[in-house]
């Protein structure tokens, strides 16, 4: 309520005036804004505190237009803002209550807790006078956002902990049990030949255990190494380097790999991660080739506004996404019967990409082929430098 336009007049009784003045002071002390809408005159009044919240305390004209406040409500909040008000008018709620963002005079936004109530009706029961309050809850909302972000981080870390618990209880426990059994067999062996066979089994088991621990170490590294050095990397050159490393595998499998990335396209990224990501995807494309045709793989890139995409497409055996789509990037999830399939590679790739705010998606048809699309943010706030054509 704008107290300059209130019904406090010189004809008011001293007691009434005193009570209203005390109410006015109480409102000012608590910094709660007050508004009043008169439907008969189609006028809205705002107290100095309401104006002060959004920086219009020195503007005596603010409120002259019926929509001075309404027009400053954030576009994403307007629908609910008007709906909550309408619900109170229609008798669906005993009080109008809404939280919305309001644009201040300086262009910034503040969060407002807006409450109101019908205080007068005409003889037909139509509302003609409303009174309400404005409270700046920006700090409260900011704290809630921080709390939500913290809870999301904790939830994510808890899920990661569950994954590690699974590794320890399943894989490492199984290795330990195998070691124990083989040592018992070794102690019970009666010939040197039997003992040598068991030692060979122990060596094989040791290699497997080392690999499991190495995978676990790499996963830990991905999760913790979020401050790794970023370097300017020309993607086409990086892909060519990886193709040279995989030359023997490519030749043995009669694979054809086309690098269609623009030679001048560069990003700032962790070089170990980009090598791991692309090499893993290329290796998988060859590993899971179709038995009736030679592998054909295409690596290409796209710039889409604030993101850059790397797409790797093959003509392999494909993945049944209806069956495995929800778990394709899960730890130790495998979808084919290859003896060397471990279910770690795609999990690592996903974590390496998400470390820098990116994402990966997959499109695949069984016996047709698979496409992996990596999306990397192209924003300065996410990486030290821009991702551009030079």
Image (cartoon, rainbow, N blue to C red):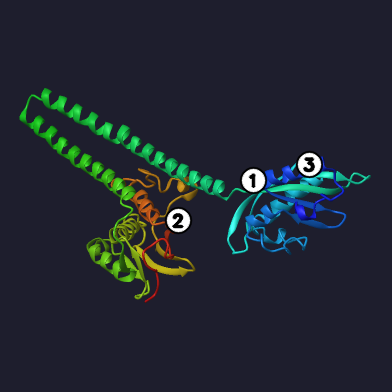
Residue 340 higher or lower than 244, as above or below: above
Q: Quadrant of the C terminus?
A: bottom left
Q: Nearer the viewer, residue 74 or 18?
A: 18
Q: CA distance from mark 3 to mark 2?
A: 45 Å
Residue 121 higher or lower than 370, as above or below: above
Q: Nearer the viewer, residue 319 or 68?
A: 68
Closer to the N terminus: mark 3 or mark 2?
3
Q: CA distance from mark 2 to mark 1?
A: 55 Å
Label 3, on which residue?
92
SS for callout 3: loop
Q: Nearer the viewer, mark 3 or mark 2?
A: 3
Percent of width and height locating residue 244? 24, 66
Label 1, on which residue?
29
Label 2, on which residue?
361
Q: Nearer the viewer, residue 166 or 292?
A: 166
Closer to the N terminus: mark 3 or mark 1?
1
In the rendered structure, the answer to whether residue 79 lies left or right of residue 234 reads right
């Amino acid at each position: 309520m704008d107290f300059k336009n209130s019904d406090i007049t010189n004809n008011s009784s001293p007691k009434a005036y005193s009570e209203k003045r005390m109410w006015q002071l109480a409102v000012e002390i608590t910094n709660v804004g007050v508004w009043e809408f008169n439907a008969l005159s189609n006028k809205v009044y705002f107290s100095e505190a309401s104006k002060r919240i959004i920086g219009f305390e020195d503007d005596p004209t603010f409120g002259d237009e019926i929509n001075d406040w309404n027009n400053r409500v954030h576009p994403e909040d307007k629908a609910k803002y008007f709906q909550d008000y309408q619900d109170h008018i229609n008798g669906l709620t005993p009080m109008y209550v809404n939280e919305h963002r309001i644009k201040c005079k300086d262009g910034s936004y503040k969060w407002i807790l807006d409450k109101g109530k019908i205080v007068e009706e005409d003889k037909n029961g139509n509302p003609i006078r409303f009174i309400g309050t404005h409270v700046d809850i920006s700090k409260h909302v900011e704290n809630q956002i921080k709390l939500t972000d913290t809870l999301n981080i904790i939830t994510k870390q808890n899920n990661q902990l569950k994954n590690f618990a699974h590794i320890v209880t399943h894989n490492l426990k199984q290795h330990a049990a195998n070691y124990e059994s083989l040592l018992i067999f070794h102690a019970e062996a009666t010939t040197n030949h039997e003992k040598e066979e068991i030692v060979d089994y122990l060596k094989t088991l040791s290699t497997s255990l080392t690999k499991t621990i190495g995978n676990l170490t790499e996963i830990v590294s991905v999760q913790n190494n979020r401050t790794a050095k970023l370097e300017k990397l020309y993607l086409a050159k990086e892909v060519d380097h990886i193709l040279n490393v995989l030359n023997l595998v490519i030749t043995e499998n009669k694979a054809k790999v086309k690098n269609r990335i623009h030679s001048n396209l560069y990003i700032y990224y962790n070089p170990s991660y980009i090598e791991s990501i692309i090499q893993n995807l290329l290796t998988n494309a060859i590993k899971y080739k179709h038995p009736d045709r030679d592998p054909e793989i295409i690596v290409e890139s796209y710039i889409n506004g604030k993101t850059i995409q790397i797409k790797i497409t093959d003509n392999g055996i494909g993945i049944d996404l209806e069956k495995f789509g929800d778990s394709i990037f899960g730890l130790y999830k495998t979808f084919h019967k290859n003896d060397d399939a471990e279910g770690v590679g795609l999990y690592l790739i996903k974590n390496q990409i998400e470390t820098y705010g990116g994402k990966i998606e997959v499109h695949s048809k069984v016996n047709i082929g698979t496409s992996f699309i990596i999306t990397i943010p192209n924003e300065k706030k996410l990486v030290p430098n821009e991702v551009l054509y030079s």
